[in-house]
Structure formats: C-alpha cells, structure tokens
C-alpha cells in the first residue's frame, strides 16, 4: 500500500510535471520501475521483452498522465496500466509458450495436480510441463486472473480495480478459469495415456 507521504510526494511531483517540468518524469520511472518489472515478470520472463513492456507501460502512463485524477494512489493507477500492458502482450502472443513454472505455484498446486485419476503422480518436471500446457490453453484474461489470484496472492478487490471489473465478475471468472484449467489438464492427461 502506498503511504500518505508517498502519495503526497507523487502528487507534488506530478503537479510539477504537468506544469512543464517534463524531465522529472524520470523520477517517476526510477520510483516505480521495480514495481512495474515485478508485475510484468509474472507474465513474461524474457529480459528483453520485459524491458520493452516496461517502456511501453511508462510511455502509456506518460501519454495518459492528464487522465490521472488522484482519487487512488498513483502507484495503483500505474499498476493498472502495467497489468493492461501485460494482458495486451499475452493477447499478441501467437506462439505456444510457458507462462508459469510449477516452482512458483508451491506445494499446494502440486497436490492439486496429483488429485487426478493418474495411477502415478507426475514428477515435478512433468507436472510443470502439464501445468504450462494447460495454462496456455486458457484465454489471456483467465491466465491473468489466475496469475494475480494464485501467484501474486492479490485480493479479489485488488484484481477488480486492476482490471476495471466488479469483484463479482472477478470471482466468477476465477471459478470458470479454474474449471477450464482442470478440463485442459484432464484432456492433456487423457492424450498421454
């Protein structure tokens, strides 16, 4: 959460930028680059693409700066732009690629994968490959909701704010995404038998 001091510092800095001190936008970049990279890293692992996506995020923020009304902290507004850039990136991806490493999901995901009907639970690498393939079968929106909910451990309220959706819509999407993920896993396992 943004502290009151950080919110005030942001407000002063943004006022100076809006009044013509455009070079001070570099302070915004320095202040929030780690946060932007952390969000983007959940969606893209390639360092070069990450840099491109971060630049795209800050460029979009710069262009939309006059739309920031200060009702929410600047950090939240920027995080929302970052998530949208990441979702746009996922939509543009045409190639099949892995999104999530099993190690990031923790032991509960491995237990969940093992609940299937397979006679022998998959080893860690096989489980990770299965999960990657199943995640890629989901829409970018479903992947984003599951990533934010399960990996980033964001609240439904936070996800709703980032996506510009209601909390109910996020909950419904999460339930449906989990079902789709389970069906995708079952299809993959059935093909391997």
Image (cartoon, rainbow, N blue to C red):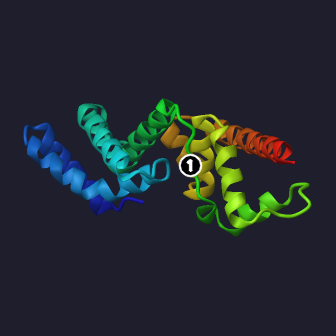
Which residue is the site of mark 1?
A: 99
* Residue 191 on image: x %, y %: 83, 42
Tell me: 82 left or right of 32: right
Quadrant assignment for the N terminus: bottom left
Q: Residue at x 70, y 69 (%)?
A: 107
Q: Is residue 73 visible?
A: no
Q: Farthest residue toward the bottom? A: 107
Tell me: 98 left or right of 86: right
Q: Residue at x 59, y 36 (%)?
A: 141
* Residue 181 on image: x %, y %: 73, 44
* Residue 168 on image: x %, y %: 67, 38
**16 and 109: which is toward the camera:** 109
Q: Residue at x 57, y 43 (%)?
A: 144
**151 and 165: which is toward the camera:** 151
Q: Examine the image and state in which quarter residue 96 appears.
A: top right
| Above or below, comparing residue 47 to residue 172 in the picture | below
Q: Residues within 10 Å of mark 1 (few under 14, many from 20)?
A: some
Tell me: 88 left or right of 139: left
* Residue 98 on image: x %, y %: 57, 48
Number of marks in the rendered image? 1
Q: Residue at x 66, y 37 (%)?
A: 138
Secondary element type, mark 1: loop
Q: Is residue 57 visible?
A: yes
| Above or below, comparing residue 73 to residue 105 in the picture | above
């Amino acid at each position: 959460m943004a502290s009151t001091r950080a919110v005030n510092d942001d407000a002063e800095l943004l006022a100076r930028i809006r009044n013509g001190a455009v070079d001070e936008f570099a302070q915004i970049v320095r202040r929030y680059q780690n946060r932007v990279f952390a969000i983007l890293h959940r969606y893209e692992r390639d360092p070069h693409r990450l840099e491109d996506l971060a630049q795209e995020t800050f460029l979009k923020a710069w262009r939309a700066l006059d739309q920031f009304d200060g009702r929410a902290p600047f950090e939240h507004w920027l995080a929302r732009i970052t998530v949208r850039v990441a979702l746009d990136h996922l939509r543009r991806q045409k190639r099949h690629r892995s999104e999530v490493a099993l190690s990031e999901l923790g032991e509960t995901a491995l237990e969940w994968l093992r609940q299937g009907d397979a006679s022998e639970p998959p080893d860690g690498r096989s489980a990770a490959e299965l999960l990657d393939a199943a995640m890629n079968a989901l829409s970018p929106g479903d992947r984003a909701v599951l990533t934010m909910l399960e990996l980033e451990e964001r609240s439904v309220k936070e996800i709703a704010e980032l996506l510009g959706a209601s909390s109910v819509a996020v909950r419904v999407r999460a339930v449906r995404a989990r079902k789709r993920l389970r069906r995708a896993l079952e299809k993959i396992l059935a093909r391997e038998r």
